[in-house]
Image (spheres, rainbow, N blue to C red):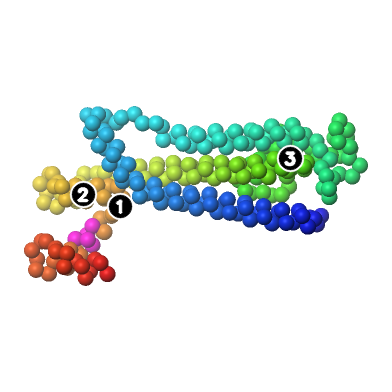
Amino acid sequence: VQPSYNAQTFLTFYVLLGALIFTNVATDVFDAAIRRTEIRLDTTLAALRERLRFNGKKPKYPSKYLPLLSSVIILGLAIFIWVMFFAHYESCTCSYGSKRVANCIDGPQCKVTGGYQTDIHSALYMAVITFSTVGFGDKAPKSKLGRCVGSFFMIFGVASFGHLVSEVFHLIDDNKNYHRKKSRCTRDTFNLIDSNKTGWISRPEFLRYVLLRQGKVDVEALRQIDQLFDEIDANRNGRLSFEEIEGVMLD
């Protein structure tokens, strides 16, 4: 069925708005991931200092699953409201305009006259495919009020779904980072930093150890930095002036 001129105009702006919202959500997810990477070292160091205040015991913090739980509750609430509304208000409708069922009678005779029917299962299916932006097109609001409510409410649903995806991504990334740090926190790593093999590390060596353990650099990067220092230190006095590094580091 060919949409009317007004319907085409509305759908054009509606699709553009939906694309902008989806793009914004996706951008926020990636930006948040980058920001979390940037602040992760600060957060870790603050947690370590806090642990020292508690004599080495890990203080109690809110569960890392709390943001994920909150996003699940918000999305669940959005789905629940959607399902209850459409399963009740559009349990059967003859629709209107070009979508109206011929010879259908709204009201008690809707089902027997071939109206569009929506039960809880169908409403749940419609909510999931709508909020996830999959949108197969086989299920959509049919009544005027349903389309008005759905048009505005699906924006909230898409945002809620995007927030849930973001929290799941962050949780997975945090768990991966934890295991990566755990694998780097070994005696071999310590011995690698302890270049003098004294059994303890100095302040500069501790800086290298923290950066290595947090995954900010790897062993090869540290070796290249040391090699670069030696190449810049032409007079081999173990120190670099600003003039010595200006032509190399500031280009």
Amino acid on which disc 1 is placed: Lys
Which quadrant, please, contains the N terminus? bottom right
- What is the CA distance from the residue labelled 3 to the residue labelled 1? 52 Å
SS for dot 1:
loop
The residue wearing badge 2 is 207
Q: Nearer the viewer, residue 106 or 114?
A: 106
Which quadrant, please, contains the C terminus? bottom left
| Residue 45 lies in the magenta stretch | no
- What is the CA distance from the residue labelled 3 to the residue labelled 2? 60 Å
- Residue found 55% across the figure and 54% down from its top: 23
The residue wearing badge 3 is 146
- Which residues, given as a range, are shown in magenta? 222-226
Amino acid on which disc 2 is placed: Leu
- Residue 169 image offset from top left, x and y in percent: 47, 45
Q: Is residue 16 left or right of residue 226?
A: right
The residue wearing badge 1 is 216
Amino acid on which disc 3 is placed: Gly
Q: Nearer the viewer, residue 86 or 14?
A: 14
Q: Nearer the viewer, residue 103 or 97?
A: 97
Q: Is residue 221 left or right of residue 68?
A: left
- Residue found 83% across the figure and 48% down from its top: 97
- Residue 108 image offset from top left, x and y in percent: 86, 30
- Residue 177 image offset from top left, x and y in percent: 36, 45
